[in-house]
Image (cartoon, rainbow, N blue to C red):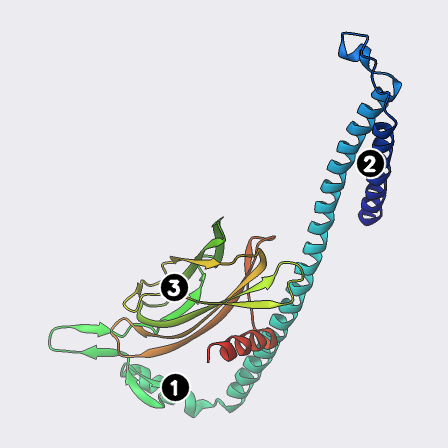
């Protein structure tokens, strides 16, 4: 509906411009025998002023409806991209849930009284079976004076259970876009980060074409994330042209607090300026984006 109205306004502007041109060319707009300006104006003069006011009003209306139409089209494009990413994310979650349910089902079927007795016996002696390392480990380390309980393994995530916000836009000045990103180390403290953070932006007209913007430094090598305490990190992106969505891919590794274990980290999110929210990218969408980044960063 807006597109037809905008077209009608454009036609109206052209017609009014032609009419103003005709009035100007024909002359005889004023009678200089009178001193006061409103008495000098003849009928054509008043028509010239009226046509000018209508022309300005029509141009303002055209600008307003054009901007509104562009905003609607932009929202539709953003929604299509979001639905595509959301569908991919939902599919990945469903597959993971099916896999987890199947694992639990198999475990229940294979469990018997002897398995329970083994686990119970290990517990009595403060031992447990570490399936990842395939060995029996102590739950409590004994020394002559102290009894130290082993901490849980840290899990670094964007946002975290205590902070629903993962990525936020701060400001823009002279092509420099400033953002804030949030991280949390769940279960335990983590440190000594070796994380790469790559940025891509989506073309503001379609949000389908993405452009590589290089890497940004999020973590210092000696950074420390306290247990369950969200930390904010700032970064900036330079772009001569406006863009729509912004995607960030963080990957690498980090250590636990006593530097005895190393853990892998790999997450990707994109920020939508219209909803002012960040969304996790998974599945085929993540594969496509990371493949594109890897090809450029070779």
Query: Could you tell me which residue is drawn at 31 percent across and 65 percent down?
Result: 220
Observer-nearest of 264 and 111: 264
Tag nearer the camera, 1 or 3 = 3
- On the image, the x and y values in percent for residue 106 come to 54, 88
> Which label is found at residue 204?
none
Q: Are marks 3 and 2 in contact (CB under 8 Å)?
A: no
Dot placed on the residue nearer the N-terminal end, 1 or 3:
1
As helix, strand or loop, the secondary structure at mark 2 comes to helix
Q: In this view, does 242 lie above or below 251?
A: above
Q: Along the horizontal axis of the image, is 262 left or right of 103?
A: left
Dot placed on the residue nearer the N-terminal end, 2 or 1:
2
Observer-nearest of 234 and 57: 57
**What residue is shown with label 3?**
218
Q: In which quarter of the image is residue 230?
A: bottom left
Query: Could you tell me which residue is drawn at 39 percent across and 86 percent down?
Result: 132
- On the image, the x and y values in percent for residue 13 come to 82, 38
Dot placed on the residue nearer the N-terminal end, 3 or 2:
2
Q: Is residue 170 visible?
A: yes
Name the residue at the left extreme: 144
As helix, strand or loop, the secondary structure at mark 1 comes to loop
Tag nearer the camera, 2 or 1 = 2
Query: Could you tell me which residue is drawn at 83 percent across and 25 percent down?
Result: 48
Observer-nearest of 2 and 257: 2
Observer-nearest of 130 and 286: 286
Distance (Cα) linking label 2 and label 1: 78 Å
Distance (Cα) linking label 3 and label 2: 56 Å
**What residue is shown with label 1?**
132
As helix, strand or loop, the secondary structure at mark 3 comes to loop
**What residue is shown with label 2?**
17
Query: Could you tell me which residue is drawn at 35 percent across and 65 percent down?
Result: 219
Q: Along the horizontal axis of the image, is 190 left or right of 282?
A: left
């Amino acid at each position: 509906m807006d597109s037809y109205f905008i077209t009608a306004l454009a036609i109206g502007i052209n017609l009014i411009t032609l009419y103003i041109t005709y009035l100007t060319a024909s002359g005889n707009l004023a009678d200089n025998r009178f001193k006061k300006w409103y008495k000098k104006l003849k009928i054509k003069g008043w028509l010239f002023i009226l046509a000018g006011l209508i022309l300005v009003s029509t141009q303002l209306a055209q600008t307003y409806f054009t901007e509104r139409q562009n905003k609607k089209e932009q929202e539709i494009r953003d929604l299509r991209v979001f639905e595509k990413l959301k569908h991919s994310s939902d599919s990945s979650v469903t597959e993971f849930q099916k896999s987890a349910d199947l694992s639990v089902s198999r475990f229940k079927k294979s469990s018997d009284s002897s398995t329970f007795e083994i686990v119970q016996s290990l517990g009595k002696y403060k031992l447990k079976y570490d399936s990842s390392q395939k060995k029996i480990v102590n739950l409590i380390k004994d020394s002559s004076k102290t009894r130290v309980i082993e901490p849980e393994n840290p899990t670094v995530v964007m946002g975290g259970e205590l902070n629903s916000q993962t990525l936020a836009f701060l400001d823009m000045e002279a092509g420099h876009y400033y953002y804030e990103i949030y991280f949390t180390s769940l279960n335990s403290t983590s440190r000594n980060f070796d994380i790469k953070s790559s940025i891509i932006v989506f073309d503001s007209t379609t949000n389908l074409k993405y452009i590589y913007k290089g890497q940004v430094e999020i973590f210092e090598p000696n950074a420390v994330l306290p247990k369950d305490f969200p930390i904010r990190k700032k970064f900036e992106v330079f772009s001569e042209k406006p863009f729509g969505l912004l995607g960030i891919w963080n990957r690498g590794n980090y250590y636990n607090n006593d530097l005895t274990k190393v853990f892998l980290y790999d997450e990707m999110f994109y920020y939508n300026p219209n909803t002012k929210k960040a969304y996790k990218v998974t599945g085929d969408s993540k594969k496509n984006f990371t493949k594109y980044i890897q090809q450029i960063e070779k």
